[in-house]
Each structure stands twice: as C-alpha cells, then as structure tokens.
Amino acid sequence: MAFESNYVTFIGNLTDDPELRHTQGGSAVVTLRLASNRRWNDRDGQQQEETTYLNVNCWRDLAENVAATFHKGDRAVAIGRLRVRSYENREGQTVWVTEIEADEVAPSLRWASASIQRTRGAGGAAGAGGGGGFTPPQSVPPAAVDDVPF
C-alpha cells in the first residue's frame, strides 16, 4: 500500500449551517462550505484581501456530529484528503471542483472555547458540545472510566 500524501488541513468559517442529508443507502452526509481570508500589504502599502472557499464533505458518524455541533459563522478545522473532480452542468459545460473528503472536523479554539461530549458511535446518539447550545439526549450515560481507550 502506498503512503497517502494528499492530506490537507483547512481552517475557515462556515458560510451556512450544516444540512444533514442521507444517501439512498442510508449513509449520513454533510457538506460544509468554509471560507478563509488572507490579508497582505501590496507594494504600495495598500492592504489586500483574498477569500478562499472550499467544500468539505463529511460522512456517516462524522456527518451527524458535525451537523449537531456547528452553525453558520463557527470557525472549524478540517483535515482530510484533497479531491479534484469534474461534472457537466445543465449548460453542458465541464465544471471542476476541489474539495476535502474529511477524516476530522474540529472547532478552532483560537477565538472560542468548546466542550467535548463523547458519542456512542455508529447508530448511536449524535452530538458533541461546543456549538450552538446543542444538548445531547439524557438517555445516553456518560462513558465509564474503564471505557477510555488510552
């Protein structure tokens, strides 16, 4: 197996609330649109700004946790594989898209704080603290000290 070398980390603010959808096969999916600004001074000393927008695809448990945690404007850190694909739009033109297939999505703690709430895993109650006042279901007991994997 070859070494996977196309991993990227992208930090930005959500442009919209995540919308949880399900495929025909029942898999949960969320697509986040993150915006990141870069500022610099040009040769004349004038401040310039450039915004980069990038879609981040989250699947299964990660999608459910992201949808329950994040809201428009939240700052997030996305880690995953960079993917470039193309499709044909309604006008018959080829459109190229660059996106991240996320392995991890986390809140940025640079200008915020977060609390962590462990979830049950596949098919269990979704939820993670730190975003928009989400309260996990009360029927899920906290993890026992013996359950911690490290």
Image: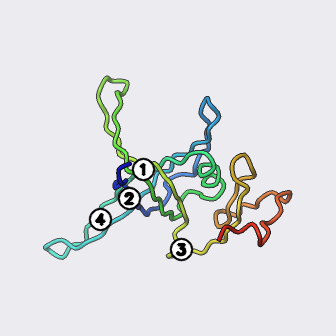
Neighbours of disc 3 within 10 Å: few (<14), some (14-19), many (20+): few
Check disc 4 and report its element: helix, strand or loop: strand
Question: What residue is pinned by disc 1?
Answer: 100
Instruction: Locate the C terminus by quadrant.
Output: bottom right
Residue 22: percent from left, percent from top: 62, 36
Q: Is residue 110 left or right of residue 128?
A: left
Question: What residue is pinned by disc 3?
Answer: 109
Q: Is residue 126 left or right of residue 87?
A: right
Task: Name the amino acid type tagged 3.
Answer: Leu
Tell us which disc is closer to us: 2 or 4: 2
Toward the viewer: 8 or 47? Answer: 8
Task: Name the amino acid type tagged 2.
Answer: Val
Mark closest to the chain's N terminus, 2 or 4: 2
Quarter of the image for residue 136 reads bottom right
Task: Name the amino acid type tagged 4.
Answer: Glu
Residue 114: percent from left, percent from top: 62, 71
Q: How is the image coloured?
A: rainbow
Question: What residue is pinned by disc 2?
Answer: 8
Instruction: Say the numbered circle drawn on residue 111.
Output: none
Task: Name the amino acid type tagged 1.
Answer: Ile
Seen from this angle, which residue lies furthest right? 139
Vertical position of residue 90 compared to residue 130: above or below: above
Question: What residue is pinned by disc 4?
Answer: 49
Toward the viewer: 103 or 68? Answer: 103
